[in-house]
Amino acid sequence: MTKFIESVIITFMPSDQAISFATLVRTRQDDICEALSSIDGTQFQLDDWERPGGGGGHTRILQSSSFEKAGVNTSEVFGPISEKETPMFSTLINKVDDTFQLTKKSHFYATGLSLVIHPKNPYVPTVHANYRYFECNNGLSTIWWMGGGADLTPYYINEDDITHFHRVHHDVCENFQPGSYANFKQACDRYFFLPHREETRGVGGIFFDYLCNDYTVQFNFISNISKAFIDAYMPIVEKQNDRTYTKEHREWQSIRRGRYAEFNLLYDRGTLFGLKTNGRIESILMSMPPKAEWQYNVVPTKGSPEDAMQQLLKNPKEWIH
Amino acid sequence: MTKFIESVIITFMPSDQAISFATLVRTRQDDICEALSSIDGTQFQLDDWERPGGGGGHTRILQSSSFEKAGVNTSEVFGPISEKETPMFSTLINKVDDTFQLTKKSHFYATGLSLVIHPKNPYVPTVHANYRYFECNNGLSTIWWMGGGADLTPYYINEDDITHFHRVHHDVCENFQPGSYANFKQACDRYFFLPHREETRGVGGIFFDYLCNDYTVQFNFISNISKAFIDAYMPIVEKQNDRTYTKEHREWQSIRRGRYAEFNLLYDRGTLFGLKTNGRIESILMSMPPKAEWQYNVVPTKGSPEDAMQQLLKNPKEWIH
């Protein structure tokens, strides 16, 4: 055990790029936790953990009167790539560079922030965001990329709120690269889709991966977009958090959260990757809804707000014109 | 459309074996529904459906004061095997006979009973059972097999109840084939296992598949074991259904039902097969728990009944000596 850790320390050093990205996500984690805590004054529960193979994470969990379950986590994991893991990492890496060869000296490093906020009030949407950096050194050169996104899952439609969320993300994307919002928005609708339900998980947002051209430009983009998350989401919480709701609204929220659970366990790459690679279960499944419900053959009354929500998920629309 | 249906009728006839198995599962469905309804007098909701490609099903749903959600379904699906479906069916069929070749004239037929009962009272275990028959004709010959099983998922340990459930199944298995219970019990523990949690879904029962030696002997076994289901489960319901429970017991039940949902969506072959082959969503996901809960890092108090339950799932034991 000691010997193994020594060998990791000796043979592996994250790049300056990796270190600056890791610092960024820790800063954003603090800012986002502070913003969420300010809503009702409840503090996050801190849970730091170490990964036996190398690295660890900072899990932040909030359970308060406003947030039924919120997790804002960062992690930094690294280590040698074992022979068993080589095919999996190769598939991933070859999406960015199909000439990059993994060797016996290969090491990976991954860091990121991942958050899922499940509010109590059914008028406040659930939100998910993720900002991540990956690099791999094969003893000869380093390959790296960034990915991430943010998406909103309301239980009831409020067009202004949804447009606001998209608008904030749109503006940062267009500032980064004109035309990128449309691509990232489309990728988001495509990714957060449940084929068996023929519906999207929520009303989308942005989703991007394998950004690997210019570190500084992209770092600034991730820095801005992760900062903008607070501007995109918190005003919605502030606006809707005190709205009165009924037991029926909560029931609809639970039913929709069943679909959220279905997506995460059936399709979400991060979840399935984490479970397959013996990741830390509690951190991976932190994204699961606090409560979910499966009733037989739920069909909302035609013309009801619940029906409108469901129809919207079957026909994703454009929010920015 | 009409033409397609005609061609199915002309080229495909289920065998006598298939018809007698289908009749058996319909009879058992009626018997089991009647037994469950008798507990508090609530009748099952009937939902019959047709499969566009051929066949259909009889869904029976119960939501009552005793049963939060129970589904007892039979289905009979058949049709030509398309080119797209050939690899999937080949893999399945070759487990029984690796020389059997699918041709363009190949048709399949599958029938079975599938039930999942999620009671309200946390002292009454959830139960699942399934009895199924599959056959395929390639224009030259027919291949067929049977499979099934029954397994119990309690929230609190009652050793007498668990032993009773196993004992009833044991006796029918040993009557069918001495030594089979031990094999079927082991297969059950192996199948209903959540690797990421390192625990079984419940306390097991029996699980068997690809029985294809002697139709009459095996038909009698399935007939007896499906009949024995009522004797194995109903006395437990009758004994525990009126026990007093608290909100905390219900919460533990919800947490455990989260694990049940995880198993079904991450690992259950039937669920994943159904979703991949565009099966009827409501019938496939009928097995999902009525309500499930995911809290962060739940660790039952050492020595509590909840802790005992969790420990048992991590160390499956023998119930019949």
Image (cartoon, coloured by chain):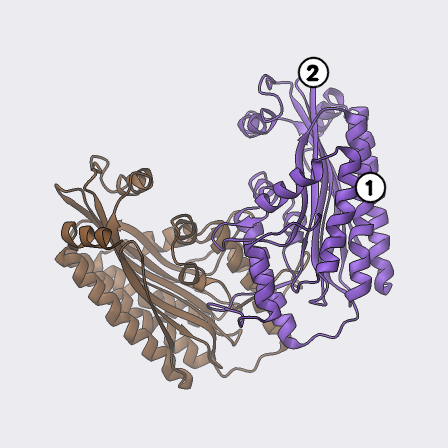
Chain colours: A purple, B brown
Crowding at label 2, few (<14), some or many (≥20) Cα neighbours within 10 Å?
A: few
What amino acid type is highlighted by mark number 1? Arg
Query: Percent position (x, y) of residue A149?
Result: 70, 43
Mark 2 lies on residue: A141
Left or right, A124 with reference to B125: right
Q: Quadrant of residue A304?
A: bottom right
* Label drawn at residue A177: none
Q: Residue at x 12, y 41 (%)?
A: B140
What is the chain identity of the residue bearing mark 2?
Answer: A
Q: Residue at x 59, y 17 (%)?
A: A101
Query: Percent position (x, y) of residue B181?
Result: 31, 57
What is the chain identity of the residue bearing mark 1?
Answer: A
What amino acid type is highlighted by mark number 2? Ser
Can residue B166 be seen here? The reply is yes
Query: Percent position (x, y) of residue A176?
Result: 78, 34
| Position of A263 relative to B131 (above/below) | above
Mark 1 lies on residue: A26
Count numbered badges in the picture. 2
